[in-house]
Amino acid sequence: MPTVSRKIERLINLTIALLATKRYLTKSEIFKSVDGYEGSAETKERMFERDKDDLRNLGVVIEVGSFDPVFEDEAGYRIKPERYSLDLGEITGVQIALLSLAAQAWRGAALDDAAHSALTKLRSIGVESDLDAVPAITPRLNAAHSDFVVITTAISKRQRISFTYLSSSLERQSRIIEPFAIATKNSHWYVAGNDTEKSQVRTFRLDRIEGEITSMTVLGGYEIPEGFDVFESLSNLQSATVATIDIRKGKAQLLRNTALSIVDKGEWDQITVEYFDSQTLIDLVLWHGEDALVKAPIELCKDVITKLHEIVLLHA
Amino acid sequence: MPKAAQTPLGRTARLLDLVPYLASHQGIELLSLAKEFDVSQSQMVADLTTLWMCGLPGYTPLELMDLSFESGFVTIHNAETLAHPRTLSDEESIALLLGLDLVIESLPSDRQDLKAIALDLVARLSARSSVPAKLSAIPVIPGSVRATIQSALRTKSSLEIVYHSSYSDIVSTRVVTPIELRDDNGFEYLWAACQSARAFRSFRLDRMQSAINKTSTAATGISTTTDENFEIDYTLRIHSRPREAMERFRFESSDLEADVEISSFSDEWIRRSVLASSGSVEIVQPQAIRTAIGKAARLILDRYEAN
């Protein structure tokens, strides 16, 4: 496809010319000097407009200015090398090794391609990765929603996203949010943001989103609160309470793993755990059947007993 | 399998990134170069040929980039203008930031030095992009467990794992010969020959408390039939909290119109799951499990009332 190659050549040549120049180049200078601009004045003009858009889509920042700000000269164009190039400051082999681990965590998952191209750019800095300096860990991010990239793009471009969310009563609700952050915990991915209808920060689990996620540009964008943290915003919703639970020795591992304290009581251990949502804790206690008994607080005990009566009644 | 973008824009991006990569890897083999950029060798030759036609205005040999690759090894000269790698896109920054967060959480606690370096990288990356720094990734599986499994898979050696079985609520030590890692519903499993049970079993990685490499040879005489291999069909009635039920028992929301018919490999799992639903679901069939659940709940109640 010679025409395709010509187009690519022209884009590369334009990038080189705009990067190499120390001053703004006018359109006529570009048409005269950069290889590949042919045809009528109108054709060249159209070509150039498309090329500028294409380069901007590749993330190349083209600055528009003029030679002399006093006179309204013809606009000129250039690419500032400091905005074109990757600049992370001094980089060591250990840092490259850590960044490689970070990129490899995406193997086979949503941002695999972006992580790979990022890694290629980092390797192009010319610093050897010092793999011996980091422990042999291979953390991995699991697969997420197929529209994962729509969310990450929306966060970086400050776009709203809309989707259908499965509520706890299985209603399909339409939600529009201004996404702040995306995070993963316990194999689930979460997106948090300002729910435009409720004007409140809400968190959504990605596997409860049905169908497509679409993004839309809002005029003026929106602000992401500084240092926003998905999991902090989750735990801030409710304050934690401490429960005391007796668990049988060698049993109830899932509860034991979260214990704040463990006291040996012979056949049983008495543990304390922190909880935000009593229903979640009751579910977990009942999973362990006869091996876990709630001792305090008394309201929690009563709730467990009520739930047990319901189970007995249902299965009578 | 090469899969890199073949759109004109995708190719332009690749060519722009090829130049700095070549400048820092002079004399690289054509084959490794194609691999790094995830394209076929002939595509890479086409890319290099296109690059060859590019340079500074004037476009005489003095201004054009000077590439040589006929020998199978690639060198580039006269390419200073493009020799610095391009800045990271937002998507690339997000990938690295989330990945770094996971690395930070996975580092052993005695490596505070590396944690500090990684945190500094997070600060540098977010200062240079429009992406908020607080992207959290909390690992499900300790990094050391996975590293041990992967090395056992490579060397075909056995592992001693401490495994928590959630159905029977027992922590046991088993010797297993890993076969492969599998993904299911967002969870990772190790499919392995379990020498303790003399059968093939799958183990969820997040339930492994530790894994140690054993250098013994692979087990023999393991049968592929296990006692867990028959399915139990059961009927569930949802009374409240339908989304929790759907996620716990793994059925589609379209099944919700009437009673849900599902199957499981373990009656222990069914019993625990129904108890843990706190009265929001009811087992309709089979009668034996239904009765067992009623009895189990009664027994726990007796314990509370005895106190």
Image (cartoon, coloured by chain):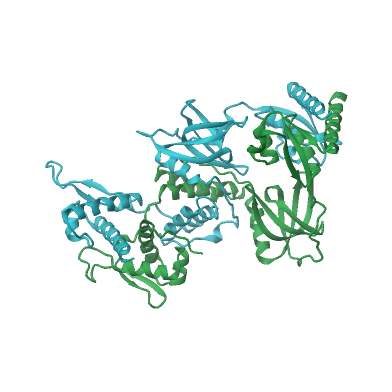
Chain colours: A cyan, B green
Q: Is residue A125 left or right of residue A308?
A: left
Task: Between residue B17 and residue B236, name the one nearer to us.
Answer: B236
Task: Between residue B128 and residue A262, name the one nearer to us.
Answer: B128
Residue sitting at x 28%, y 53%: A51
**Which of the 4 image quadrants contains residue A255?**
top right
Q: Can residue A265 be seen from the camera position used here?
A: no
Q: With respect to residue A152, does B143 lie above or below? A: below
**Which of the 4 image quadrants contains residue A281?**
top right
Residue A137 horizontal/vertical position (percent): 60, 55
Residue B209 horizontal/vertical position (percent): 71, 49
Q: Is residue B58 left or right of residue B92?
A: left
Residue sitting at x 48%, y 57%: A116
Residue B236 horizontal/vertical position (percent): 74, 36
Q: Quadrant of the N terminus of chain A?
A: bottom left
Residue A154 horizontal/vertical position (percent): 43, 40
Q: Quadrant of the C terminus of chain A?
A: top right
Q: Residue furthest front?
A: B258
Q: Residue furthest bottom?
A: B71
Task: Between residue A138 and residue B194, name the one nearer to us.
Answer: B194
Count of numbered circles in the view = 0
Q: Can residue B152 be seen from the camera position used here?
A: yes
Residue sitting at x 11%, y 42%: A71
Task: Between residue A277 and residue B284, name the one nearer to us.
Answer: B284
Residue sitting at x 49%, y 25%: A198
